[in-house]
Amino acid sequence: MPRYFMHLAYRGLPFHGWQTQPGAVSVQSTIEQSLTTLVRTPVKITGAGRTDAGVNARMMIAHFDMPEPIADLTRFVRSLNSIVGRDIAIYSLTPVHDDAHARFDATSRTYHYRTVAHKSPFVYPLTWCSRGRLDFEAMNHAASLLLKVSDFTSFAKLHTDVKTNICSVTRAEWVKDGADGMTFVITADRFLRNMVRAVVGTLVDVGRGRLSCDDFKGIIEARDRCAAGTSMPPEALFLWDITYPYYRPADCMYEL
């Protein structure tokens, strides 16, 4: 069966996360239902990750199999976009090898968490308002410590079924976004459930002067979720980028 990579984006607020759940509207179930309607046979998709309820994706990659090759990819994408609704955008479909896997073949994922210092009706609800300035330098100093550790138990959601809390973070920094905004950018090979929002919440405590950088280091070393800060609201979080050794979603390039 021909396999395809799907490059898509979505606004998280209307959905109960990416993954299909009984009695809830998810991104995965919405796309699967739309594909099934279009091709008139059940189609299942597998995503590169599982975003929580309310979390957005500037880029998500999913793979799926078709009973027959798609004759006109451009027309198929156009038809699929007319069904999935306005909160999901399908950008492209790319034929890939039979065992290509959207989740397991991804080498890195990048998340952005967007903040503004003052309330604005023009950026709500896709940002979080700090209602005051945060200490940019202190937060970046603390964030740099994330590059030196691998165990992120302190930022992992409790009572999940993951086998390990080990992650390799290759980028973690705050970037100024205009005169009023800051965005936290973090890249890793994998992320734990709720990890980014917990990291940001703890860094915000550093930015407000409630925690020092030494306190932040101690929280990491404690390996205790209760020691870290609160989990930030989901609507300001974006799955921003995903990389593969053989596929470049931005320009739909695929190389074996």
Image (tube, rainbow, N blue to C red):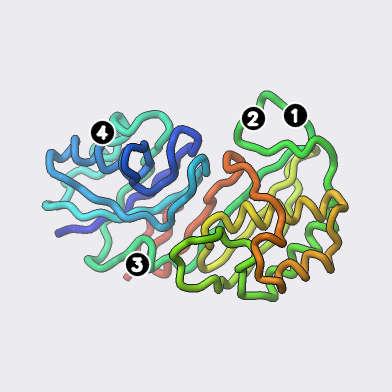
Drawn side of residue 198 relative to residue 29, left or right: right
At a point 12% along the width and 39% down the height, the residue shown is: 40
Please rate how many residues cluster around mark 2, counting C-alpha atoms within 10 Å: few if below 14, some from 14 to 19, many from 20.
few
Tell me the amino acid under the disc marked 3: Glu
Q: Are marks 1 and 3 in contact (CB under 8 Å)?
A: no
Q: Quadrant location of residue 25?
A: top left
Please rate how many residues cluster around mark 4, counting C-alpha atoms within 10 Å: few if below 14, some from 14 to 19, many from 20.
some
The answer for how far apart the CA atoms under marks 2 and 3 are is 39 Å
At a point 44% along the width and 44% down the height, the residue shown is: 17
Q: Which residue is mark 4?
A: 79
Please rate how many residues cluster around mark 1, counting C-alpha atoms within 10 Å: few if below 14, some from 14 to 19, many from 20.
some
Q: Which residue is mark 1?
A: 119
Drawn side of residue 143 relative to residue 127, left or right: right
The answer for how far apart the CA atoms under marks 1 and 3 are is 45 Å
Q: Nearer the viewer, mark 4 or mark 2?
A: 2
Where 126 falls versus 92 (above or below)?
above
- Locate residue 240, reporting x and y percent: 54, 51
Q: Which residue is mark 3?
A: 255
The mark that comes first in sequence, 2 or 3, is 2
Tell me the amino acid under the disc marked 1: Lys
The mark that comes first in sequence, 1 or 3, is 1
Tell me the amino acid under the disc marked 4: Ser
SS at mark 3?
A: loop
Q: Quadrant of the N terminus?
A: bottom left
The answer for how far apart the CA atoms under marks 4 and 2 are is 31 Å
Q: Which mark is residue 124?
A: 2
- Locate residue 34, reporting x and y percent: 25, 37
